[in-house]
Each structure stands twice: as structure tokens, then as C-alpha cells.
Image (tube, grey):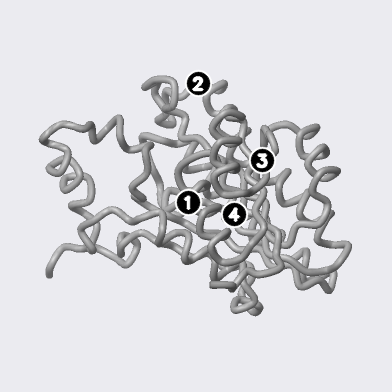
Amino acid sequence: MSRLKNKRAIITGAARGIGLGLAKHFVQEGCEVVLTDIDVEAGSREAEALSSRFVRLDVRTEDDWEMLEKLCPTPDILINNAGITGFENGTAPHDPEHVSLRDWHDVHRTNLDGTFLGCRYALRCMGKRGTGSIINISSRSGLVGIPGAAAYASSKAAIRNHTKTVALYAAQKGWTIRCNSVHPAAILTPLWDAMLGDGPDRDRRMEALVADTPLKRFGTIEEVAALCVMLASDEARYVTGSELSIEGGLLAGSAAQP
């Protein structure tokens, strides 16, 4: 398994969840991976287990990105994965009528500003050689309206659009720097544990949450990773400015029978 041999990838939000899953799969494909996160303890532990490198990075902070540019000036791949939903510290309202401006800004600062700064870092570094792959992790929520999570949906939709802007900019410069977005829906990660619980009714709750998904199940981190490996590899040399959804058929149309 060496589809990413001799390539170096920077992955944000890699201490857990999808980011960590991506790091594991990229290492398996022969890639040199630099894990980044604000969680130094978990990030360092996971990087050590993968015989990889860890760099503390707060994606919201310009100074951190500039430091990363000094430490890792030659990435072949950047995955902008770090993100928040806005519900990490409680259940404050996030609908468009009641969400506070502070909460709105907090979500956009991490999800959108972090992706903007990441793309800028990648273009500056990759532009010196004129080649590379940028993968922005958006969401199914960036393709449809989500009344209960207005800030999250807005930020992920903006990531989708900025991906296309970056792709066009790189192409106009004559670079073979590709930029694509990935849009997962319900991917089974530890983020769902609070809702699913660990009791005897966990399976029932899981079934209820994916009842409207045509494939009737959660997606897996491995399935997201497989898609990202393809986008990062030379197999996808002609793929840029694209949005690839991985949501079990949710966006294919109504599941109701005529």
C-alpha cells in the first residue's frame, strides 16, 4: 500500500475522530504525516503511536500557521479537517433566530477562518513547486439548510465555495495544485457518543438517527479516509474544484416511495 509514497501530508484536527482516521490511513499508504491539533496530549500520543510528527496548531490563529510554515514548508497534501459544531460546551440555541453573534462567530472562526488560513498556507508553500493537493472537509450540512445548526451549516457551505475559488486560483496561476471538498454526513465517530450513549438502547438510537438515510447506516471513518486517499494521490490529477459527498444517499432525493 504505497499510493502516497514520498508525499508529506499536514492534517488539522488530527488528535481524534476523522482527522486521526485520516492520519492512520495516510501512514498506511506510505505517506509522511504531520498531525496537528490544539490537544497537545492526545495529538502527541497518537503521533508517537504512528511514528509520526505532531505540531500544536490552533487553526484560528494566524501566528500558528506562520509557525507551521517555518516548521513544515514543503507539504504535498493539506487536509483542513479541524472543525466544531458549536454544541461542544452545551446546548445553546443555534437556530437563525436565537443563535448569539458570539456563537456564530466562534463556529465560523474555527471552521471557515481555519480553512482559509490553511488554504493560504498551502498555496504559499505548494506554489513554490507548483503542485499539491488540498482537501477541505466540509459536510453534508454545507449542501442543505440545517435550521437547528445555522452557523455550522453556513460555515460548511462557505468552505465548499472557497474550495472552488482556491481551485480556480491555482489553475489560473498555472499550478497543478488541486483543491477539493469532501462532504460527510453521519460518520460514526466519538462525537456521536453523547447522543447515542452506551446503554442497551444504543442500537435502537443508531437506527433512528439513520432511518432517513437510504443505506440505513452510519458511514465509517475508513470510508471517508478511502475517499481522501484517492483525492490526495496522483490518481486524481484531473480532479479539482469538485465536491464529493459521502452520505449514504441522503442527497440523491426523497426516499419516499411514489
Residue hosting label 3: 54
Spatial distance from mark 4 to mark 1, Cα to Cα?
Answer: 15 Å
Which mark's residue is nearer the viewer, 1 or 3? Answer: 3
- Estimate the x, y position of residue 35 in percent, counting from the top left: 63, 45
Nearest to N terminus: mark 4 or mark 2: 2
The three-letter amino acid code for the residue at tag 2 is Ser
Image-based side of 4 in relation to 209, left or right:
right
Nearest to N terminus: mark 1 or mark 3: 1
Name the mark on residue 100: 2
Nearest to N terminus: mark 4 or mark 1: 1
**Foreground pick, 122 / 173:** 122
Write down the quadrant of residue 194 in the picture: top left
**Foreground pick, 97 / 123:** 123
Is residue 158 visible in the rendered structure shown here?
Answer: no
Spatial distance from mark 3 to mark 4, Cα to Cα?
Answer: 20 Å
Nearest to N terminus: mark 2 or mark 1: 1
The three-letter amino acid code for the residue at tag 3 is Phe
